[in-house]
C-alpha cells in the first residue's frame, strides 16, 4: 500500500493535480464554513465528485447514514467487514440499512485473510498488521474508483482529529475526504439521534461508546475517555485508514 501511495505521487502532473485539489478543498471549506452538517453532506454529494460514505455502523454512525438516506438513498455506503466484528454490529448494519432505506450498501472484505491470517492470531502479535490486512488495504482498494469519501470523524474524538475541517485532501491518493460532523460535540450527536428517533447500537447500553472489532474493543468505565476501550493499554488511537503525509497512520474510523 505504501508503494501504491508513492506511485500516485510520482505520476506526471501529480503536483499540478494536487494544487488544484487543494484549491478546490479550500474553496469548499470557505463556502461551507458556517453551514450545517447536512449542508456539508449535500455539498459533498453534489460538488466533490464521485463520493462514497464509509461507515463502521458503530455507536454514532447512524447520524451520517440518516443524513445520507434523506438526501439520496442510493449513496454508495462502504462497510468493511473485518470478520472480527461483534455479532451485534453485523445485525445492526442490516437493521439500520433496511430501516433507513439505504439501497447501495457495499460490504467490503479482504480476500487474503485465509492466506495471511488463517487462525486469526495476527492481532496478538501485531495489531497494526491486523488492521492493515482486514481493514486498511481492503478499504483503499474499494475507494480506488471514487474521487472522495465521507467520514464520521469529529474533533472531540482524539488529539489526531482536533483540527479537522469539513473538507480535506487525503495525502497521496488524490481524493477529497469529507467530515460533515467535524465540529459536532457529543451532545449534538445525541440530540440528532433523539430528534430523529434513530436506533442505537445495542452495545452502547452495555458500556461501549466506541465500537470496533470485538477482540480489540472493551467496555469503558465511567469517567474514562469514550475511546479508552479501543486498543486498551496500547499506544494506538486509530485503525490506520487515514492518510497523513503520504502514510497510513496507526494512531478508528
Image (cartoon, grey):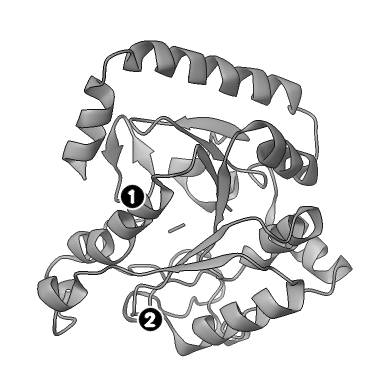
Task: Judge the density around disc 1: few (<14), some (14-19), many (≥20) Cα neighbours within 10 Å.
Answer: some
User: Up-down: is 204 above or below 129?
Assistant: below
Horizontal arrangement in the rendering, residue 184 relative to residue 171 (left or right) = right
Dot 2 falls on a residue whose secondary structure is: helix
Task: Judge the density around disc 2: few (<14), some (14-19), many (≥20) Cα neighbours within 10 Å.
Answer: some
Give yes or no for contact between labels 2 and 1 (Cβ–Cβ under 8 Å). Answer: no
Q: CA distance from mark 2 to mark 1?
A: 18 Å
Residue at image x 42%, y 48%?
143
Horizontal arrangement in the rendering, residue 93 relative to residue 67 (left or right) = left
Q: Which one is in front, 63 or 144?
A: 144
Q: Quadrant of residue 238?
A: bottom left
Horizontal arrangement in the rendering, residue 102 relative to residue 76 (left or right) = right
Q: Is residue 112 visible?
A: yes
Query: Which label sits on residue 219?
Result: none
Dot 1 falls on a residue whose secondary structure is: loop
Q: Earlier in the sequence, mark 2 or mark 1?
A: 2
Residue highlighted by disc 1: 251
Q: Residue 137 in the image: state x and y as whole percent.
A: 28, 55
Residue highlighted by disc 2: 214
Residue at image x 47%, y 80%?
219
Residue at image x 11%, y 74%?
115
Amino acid at each position: 500500500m505504501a508503494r501504491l501511495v508513492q506511485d500516485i505521487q510520482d505520476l506526471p502532473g501529480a503536483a499540478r493535480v494536487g494544487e488544484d485539489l487543494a484549491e478546490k478543498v479550500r474553496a469548499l471549506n470557505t463556502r461551507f464554513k458556517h453551514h450545517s452538517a447536512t449542508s456539508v453532506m449535500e455539498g459533498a454529494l453534489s460538488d466533490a465528485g464521485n463520493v462514497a460514505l464509509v461507515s463502521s455502523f458503530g455507536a454514532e454512525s447512524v447520524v451520517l447514514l440518516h443524513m445520507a438516506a434523506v438526501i439520496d438513498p442510493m449513496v454508495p455506503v462502504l462497510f468493511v467487514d473485518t470478520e472480527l466484528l461483534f455479532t451485534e454490529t453485523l445485525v445492526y448494519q442490516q437493521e439500520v440499512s433496511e430501516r433507513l432505506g439505504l439501497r447501495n450498501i457495499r460490504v467490503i472484505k479482504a480476500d487474503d485473510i485465509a492466506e495471511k491470517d488463517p487462525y486469526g492470531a495476527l492481532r496478538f502479535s501485531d495489531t497494526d498488521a491486523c488492521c492493515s490486512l482486514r481493514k486498511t488495504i481492503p478499504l483503499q482498494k474499494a475507494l480506488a474508483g471514487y474521487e472522495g469519501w465521507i467520514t464520521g470523524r469529529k474533533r472531540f474524538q482524539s488529539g489526531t482529529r482536533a483540527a479537522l475541517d469539513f473538507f480535506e485532501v487525503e495525502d497521496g491518493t488524490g481524493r477529497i475526504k469529507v467530515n460533515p460532523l467535524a465540529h459536532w460535540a457529543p451532545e449534538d450527536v445525541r440530540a440528532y439521534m433523539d430528534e430523529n428517533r434513530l436506533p442505537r447500537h445495542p452495545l452502547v447500553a452495555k458500556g461501549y461508546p466506541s465500537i470496533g472489532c470485538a477482540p480489540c474493543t472493551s467496555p469503558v468505565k465511567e469517567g474514562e475517555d469514550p475511546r479508552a476501550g479501543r486498543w486498551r493499554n496500547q499506544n494506538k488511537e486509530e485503525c490506520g485508514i487515514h492518510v497523513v503525509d503520504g502514510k497510513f497512520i496507526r494512531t478508528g474510523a
